[in-house]
Image: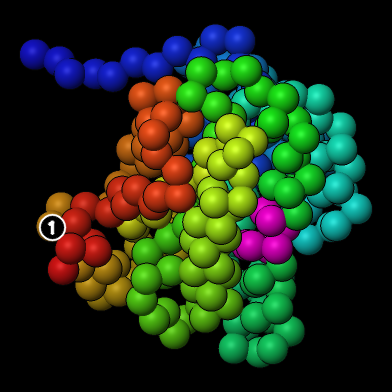
Amino acid sequence: MTNKLRFDFGGTSVLVTGGTSGIGHAVATAFAGAGASVAVTGTRASAAEYERDLSAFSYRQLEMRDRGAVDALAAGLDRLDVLVNNAGANFPDGRDEWDPDGFSAALALNVEGAMRLTVGSRRALAASSMAGGASVVNLVSMTAFRSTTIVPGYSAAKAALLALTRNLAAHWAADGIRVNAVAPGLVDTPMTAPMKGLPGLLEAEVGRGFVPRMAVPEEVAAAVLFLSSDASSFTTGSVLAVDGGYLAR
């Protein structure tokens, strides 16, 4: 018995920031598998510098804190059907996020760059003729909903990105651009890999949900594709938790 859901994004243009690994790569792969033309961003000079095969996508080097580079990427877009703001990380440049400069760096990396790219892409998104309208999907986090004393800057940035999601949804409704967020729980990615060396911490986090395991990136990708499809054409300003029941506790 199978209940697999298949999406068709043939003819659409998709941009996934931070699409070289983890959740971003799973999202980009899912869109490409559904027929979309997918561009991904990464911080290295070329796609060849990554061990992962990125040949299914076009590649753009982008540092989310480089305002000029973000503006240039947005200005070069003629038409964009889906923008997935996934790029981000905790402890930017290895900094302590309780240090004011580290906190500021976390905000710049995880929310300010996404806001700049999204607003700069408004014209390209408004030019979309995709059924259900153009779509922006922001990747937030469980840290947006509760205190996280290890990464206060990352947590604040994700909470701000969630608020931005709702404000953009209202601000751009007349343009036919839907804006939603996906909030993953604990996902098995390179960013969370260090937790495997701290079994007490990992078990505590996994134990917060009803499903006693980490998610895989493909489970988050499925939610992003749903929110980008015409199956969710009446959905905007919403956040979809892919968290194994984490928020229901």
From the viewer's perspective, is residue 102 above or below residue 89?
below
Decide whether residue 150 is among the magenta residues.
Answer: no
User: Which quadrant of the figure has residue 48?
Assistant: top right
Q: Residue at x 40, y 17 (%)?
A: 7
Q: Nearer the viewer, residue 167 or 249?
A: 167
Q: Position of residue 193 (x, y in %)?
A: 43, 58
Asked whether residue 22 is in view, the answer is no
View extreme (front): residue: 174
Q: Position of residue 43 (x, y in %)?
A: 75, 48
Magenta segment boundaries in residue numbering: 109-115
From the viewer's perspective, is residue 147 above or below residue 30?
below
Q: Position of residue 114 (x, y in %)?
A: 67, 54
Q: Residue at x 55, y 27 (%)?
A: 133
Quadrant of the drawing holding the C terminus: bottom left
The residue that mark 1 highlights is 210
User: Which quadrant of the figure has residue 109?
Assistant: bottom right
User: Which quadrant of the figure has residue 232?
Assistant: top left
Please state if 202 lies on the left or on the right of 157 as rendered. left
Q: Nearer the viewer, residue 130 or 98?
A: 130
Dominant secondary structure of the residues highlighted in magenta in the image: helix
Q: Position of residue 10 (x, y in %)?
A: 54, 10
Neighbours of disc 1 within 10 Å: few (<14), some (14-19), many (20+):
some
Please state if 241 lies on the left or on the right of 137 as rendered. left
From the viewer's perspective, is residue 230 above or below residue 99?
above
Quadrant of the drawing holding the N terminus: top left
View extreme (bottom): residue: 99
